[in-house]
Amino acid sequence: MIVLCVVAFAVALLAAGFIVRWVRGHAARYGAAMPQRFHFGHVPRLGGAAVLLGIAASWILGAAQAGWGDPGSLRLGHWVGWWLLALLPAALGGIAEDLVQRLSVLYRLALTGFSGLLAVGVAGITLPRLGLPWLDMVLELAPWLGWGIAVLAIAGLPHAFNLIDGYNGLAGMVALIVCLALAHVALQVGDRALAALLVSTAAATAGFLVWNYPRGLLFAGDGGAYVWGVVIALASLSLVQRNSDVSPWFPMLLLIYPVWETVFSIYRKAARGVSPGVADALHFHQLIYRRIVRSVFHDDESRRLLMRNNRTSPYLWGFTLLTVAPAVMFWNNTPVLMVFCAVFVISYVAAYLAIVRFKVPGWLRR
């Protein structure tokens, strides 16, 4: 497992460095008028390509090692290839959008949906239970519902990660934390193969973060968000599918921040009569940047903006850890996990309204 992590980190680190050094021309395509833009200059948005290369190199090496005798007893077989096949449509679609900035939301949603269909069709991914007896009975009688939920999760989570990707280190660190939490529980139930894929994904993400935080030399872009979303969705569903002790609400609580951010954004845009596909600057992390993170004094305006950008992400890392900690502690206790999900939703709405109404405690702005 250590070898796979080293390979994933090194490949992603070197690929990201190559992009920063040699593939900067496309960065000018990202217009200065975009509402999500909180940086000066032209920064490449192909970090997702580096993460994808790191993941692919480590997963293929792991599958090859299994064929050579499996020295690490990871039992990585041909199913790893099916995972990569399911990952490619979403990942390549996101990278293409980062290059040309012309793919519509519906087209990208179709590509992530196709990844979901491939995962169900060729990798056998499904959701066998929901942790509630009467719903589990329905899934047992109508297994196609589990397939549909799996496709929806794999199609939707990449866009949820894309929604929270706005500041240096934000989405990348959230993905790294979630991957490590899933890997921890996978090891608890003896699923070393799944843990290996997740830890190598975290390592590839760390290789990208070397360039992304705090210097902001490279962004993940849609490609990075889609890679993280698909891999984490596949791993979450597989962990529940392959291990009956794991509550399906464990990954739900782990991912409640990006999931609820997406649901809440759709609601507030619909309430204003705006299409959910229209970008705006009213997401939770953007409000923290504008109303909680204090102005930074520096002679250089671009440096000042970068420093404020970097100070925003730790607020959201802490917010994520508030859900990750109880999820890891109570990974097999459905009622407790459901309660924490409800507590998060209430806390999120309360915090959002407090920020909008300028009722943030002073100590948070220090």
Image (tube, rainbow, N blue to C red):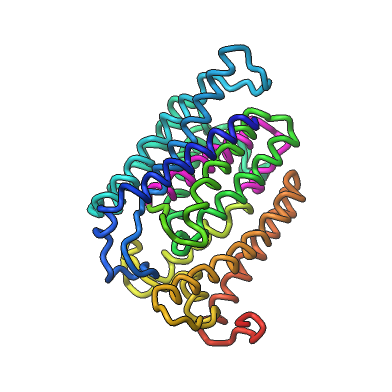
Asked if residue 333 shows in the view, the reply is: yes
Q: Position of residue 257 (x, y in %)?
A: 56, 60
The quarter of the picture where the C terminus appears is bottom right
* Residue 34, magenta (yes or no): no
Residue displayed at 26% across by 65% down: 31
Is residue 225 part of the magenta span, yes or no? yes
In which quadrant of the rendered view does residue 138 lie?
top right
Q: How many marks?
A: 0
Q: Which x, y percent locates residue 275? A: 31, 65
Identity of the residue drawn at 34% across and 66% down: 279
The residue nearer to you, when weighing 169 against 131, is 169
Viewer-nearest residue: 5 or 315: 5
Residue under the image location 32 percent in, 47 percent down? 22
Question: x, y (%) of residue 68?
Answer: 58, 12
User: What is the quadrant of the N terminus in the image?
Assistant: top right
Considering depth in this image, is 196 or 130 the residue closer to the camera? 196
Note whether 121 is above or below 29 in the view shown. Answer: above
* Residue 94 against residue 191 in the figure, above or below: below
**Left or right position of 247 against 281:** right
- Magenta region: which residues? 222-251
Question: Is residue 154 at all visible to an observer of this figure?
Answer: no
**Image quadrant in which you'd find residue 32:** bottom left
Q: Percent from the top left, x then y, of residue 187?
A: 72, 35
Dominant secondary-structure state across the stretch colored magenta? helix
